[in-house]
Amino acid sequence: MVVKIKRFINKLKMKKTLIVASSLLAPALLFAQVVVDNFKDLLHSIGVVINWVIPVVVALAVLVVIWGAFQFVVSAGDPEKRKEGKDKIIWGIVGVVVILSIWGLIGFLASTFDLGGTVPNVPTVPVIAL
């Protein structure tokens, strides 16, 4: 019975998180509305969206790795929590690799088919000038 209640609460939390995330990301869909005249314009629009999405997703994956490392270090006495932290680290790294692989594949295909200007930009780390 307790397990069912915990699952129900987890489902409610996921639904709330999904609702909040979708409402926060809804304006981004409006910014993406572009009149497309031809196929190259469509590809350029997709490239613009990809250039915006890739750094955000990479940052989220890095945050998962950092959170997993924190959880791994803090839960030294509990092997189950340590395993959860280790799993988060592994899946975060896998996420970064997959994201960057997709980014590279898109860049490769864009340059192979000479789509001109649709190659996603390389994400850069901001520099703080002192």
Image (cartoon, rainbow, N blue to C red):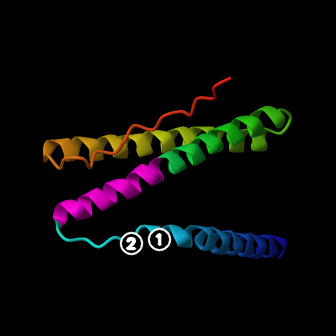
In this view, 125 is above or below 57 = above
Locate residue 48, reporting x and y percent. 36, 55
What is the quadrant of residue 36 in the picture?
A: bottom left
Locate residue 117, reporting x and y percent. 24, 47
Which residue appears farthest toward the front when viewing the image? 130
In the picture of the structure, the residue carrying the numbered disc 2 is 33
Q: Identify the residue shown where x is 40% and y is 58%.
A: 49
Mark 2 surroundings: few (<14), some (14-19) or many (≥20) residues within 10 A: few
Which residue appears farthest toward the left when viewing the image? 113
In the picture of the structure, the residue carrying the numbered disc 1 is 29
On screen, residue 78 versus residue 30, left or right, reads: right
Mark 1 surroundings: few (<14), some (14-19) or many (≥20) residues within 10 A: few
In this view, 60 is above or below 74 = below
Which amino acid type is marked by label 1?
Leu
Residues at marks 1 and 2 touching, judged by CB atoms closer than 8 Å = yes
Which residue appears farthest toward the top when viewing the image? 130
Q: Is residue 51 magenta?
A: yes
What is the quadrant of residue 33 in the picture?
A: bottom left
Q: Is residue 41 magenta?
A: yes
Quarter holding the N terminus is: bottom right
In this view, 73 is above or below 64 = above
Label 1 vs label 2: CA separation?
A: 7 Å
On screen, residue 13 versus residue 23, left or right, reads: right
Which amino acid type is marked by label 2?
Gln
| SS for dot 1 | helix
Q: Identify the residue shown where x is 48% and y is 34%.
A: 124
Q: Toward the viewer: 81 or 105? A: 105
Magenta residues (range):
39-54
Q: Toward the viewer: 119 or 20? A: 119
Dominant secondary structure (helix, strand or loop) of the stretch shown in magenta: helix
